[in-house]
Amino acid sequence: MQMSFLLYEGIEPVDLAAIGVVSMAKRVIPGLSYETLARDRQAVQFSNGLLVVPSRSFEEVEEVDVLLVPGGPGWRKASEDPAVLAFIRRVAPSALVCSVCTGAMILAAAGALDGLSATTKIEVVPPEVSPLHELRERYPEVRPEAALLVDSGAVITGGGVTLCIDAVLYLLEKRYGKDAADEVARIMEYGAARDANRARFGQTAAPLPA
């Protein structure tokens, strides 16, 4: 599995934990790899000022294995960025597409969630509006779910913020099986947190394929 992590201005740095999971998982599954993609090769500024230099530009990419769209306060501008939306629409038909946190709002703007169930970030600081509620209001063609993650087959949406870790572990389980994902969670010392998140939300909206 190669994860292509989509970059845009204003990503929440916590969502980099998705890449951290793949980095740790290489100890268990050596064939894993990841890259970062953006509209060009210029450094992208995250919400806290962190600068991340993308591995490749959108134009340099022909195919994507797993596209991961992160969240953060910059999602509003990204969901109106023609380059970001065009790239998602171009690669989505042949890729496994996954969002974490408010990355789902960008997928919705690209039309990638039309007719599907999806989840996104739920908890906010008042008077902010829950992104899950906003997903329902802005995109009536999407069925919002308060879930740890929602697996709709070719599109997976993960919950908010640190639940990006659970989403990537799920991706690993989907590709490499339960034992491999459990071992990655173990070496990350994330097993108890993973169990707690599952208990909090219950099962995913759709089970792993047999």
Image (cartoon, helix red, strand yellow):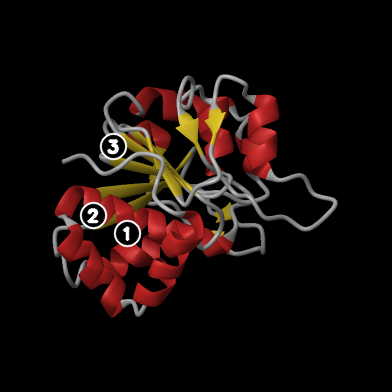
In the rendered structure, the answer to whether residue 121 lies left or right of residue 15 reads: right
* Residue 179 on image: x %, y %: 16, 64
Q: Is mark 3 in CB contact (under 8 Å) with mark 2?
A: no
* Residue 24 on image: x %, y %: 29, 71
- Residue under the image location 14 percent in, 58 percent down: 31
- Residue under the image location 35 percent in, 80 percent down: 189
Q: Which residue is mark 3?
A: 64
Task: Residue 173: give its label.
Answer: 2
In the rendered structure, the answer to whether residue 65 lies left or right of residue 87 reads: left
| Residue 84 visible here | no
Q: Is residue 18 above or below residue 133?
A: below
Counting residues from the N terminus, which is met first, the one under dot 3 or under dot 2? 3
What's the distance in space between the residues labelled 1 and 2, CA to CA?
6 Å
The quadrant holding residue 193 is bottom left
Question: Disc 2 on helix, strand or loop?
Answer: helix
For label 3, the crowd category at 10 Å Cα-Cα, with few meaning under 14, some 14 to 19 and many 20 or more, is some
Mark 3 or 1, closer to the camera: 1
